[in-house]
Amino acid sequence: MAKLSPREIKRKIQGIKNTQRITKAMKAVSAAKLVKAKNKLNATRPYSEKLYDLVNDLGSFVDRTLHPLLDIREEKSIDYIIITADRGLAGAFNSSVIKTALKDIERLIQEGKKVSLILIGRKAVQFFRRLNYEIVEAHEDVYRDNLNLRFTSQVGSTIIRRYVEKQSDAVYMINNELITTAKYETKIRKLFPIDPELNLEKFDELTRYNIEPLTEVVLDGVLRQYTDFQIYRGLVESNTAEHAARMLAMDNATRNAGEAIKRWTVIFNKARQESITNELIDIVNAAKALKEKE
């Protein structure tokens, strides 16, 4: 690499400082968004878990032939809902979901199973469109406009239709979930089939279920609500984890920029000292040459 002059080094340091200001601002924005997202997540998780428990209890209690969504069959065709962010600059946030999904999908294909994808998030759409997988639906710019139950109801309707019509035998969802502010994990959740293990300790409690007016009507409403809300929770989990990941990534970038500024400042000082030394040598040599002429 060509040796840089003090002026070029100074320009480089200023460029790093400008980048540092941007990453610092992005960290602050992500931190503010994270607070709002965590509030929504804390309101979402309890209802989602209770709904999940209710559906599993009903799966143990009711006659499963009453609703096609309670049907259990061999998993030959599988739908995967893959949820990523629309934007990058969040460390390994998106690549973690994509790598986990790819590994699981390839395993299933090697087992002779058919896999279809429902993609939510621009990063997932951009990646999987380049590969030779069947894509049922692809949604971008979800978090800006569509983070609501109206959108998840549309996706849920597609999932339910495909499962009822036996186009799919199982539905899995892959997304990142927030563990702590400094940690997130990629999770794979099974939405269908609902295959609860019978808990004998809860048997007396289950027998107290009274379903009115009609079991079929109640089951249909509960199962649709379950589907829509589990997808909604997946989006809220992913959105919250994304802000946390971006905040940490920008914090690391800001610190790295600070370290780079220190290194380049040392280089600048050495280059400036070298430049001053060379100028002094030139002055001394010039003075000596003039003296010799006299």
Image (spheres, rainbow, N blue to C red):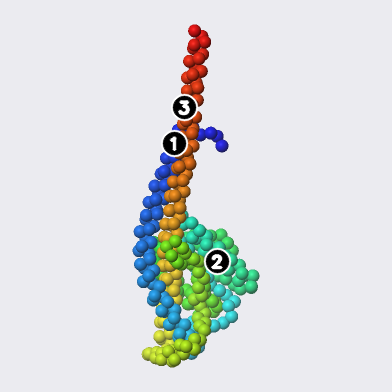
Q: Is residue 51 left or right of residue 162?
A: left
Residue 87 visible in the displayed image: no
Q: In which quarter of the image is residue 214?
A: bottom left
Tell me the element at label 3: helix
Q: Could you give the CA–CA distance between mark 3 and mark 2, rounded to whole angstroms?
A: 59 Å
Is 194 or 33 nearer to us in this picture?
Answer: 33
In x, y percent, where is residue 50? 41, 79
Question: Which amino acid, mark 3?
Answer: Ile
The earlier-in-sequence mark between 1 and 2 is 1
Mark 2 closeness class: few <14, some 14–19, many ≥20 residues within 10 Å: many
Residue that badge 3 annotates: 276
Q: Quadrant of the N terminus?
A: top right
The residue drawn where x is 41% and y is 75% is 48
The residue drawn where x is 58% and y is 68% is 104
Residue that badge 2 annotates: 101
How many marks can you see? 3
Is 34 or 284 nearer to us in this picture?
Answer: 284
The earlier-in-sequence mark between 3 and 1 is 1
Mark 1 closeness class: few <14, some 14–19, many ≥20 residues within 10 Å: some
The earlier-in-sequence mark between 3 and 2 is 2
Tell me the element at label 2: helix
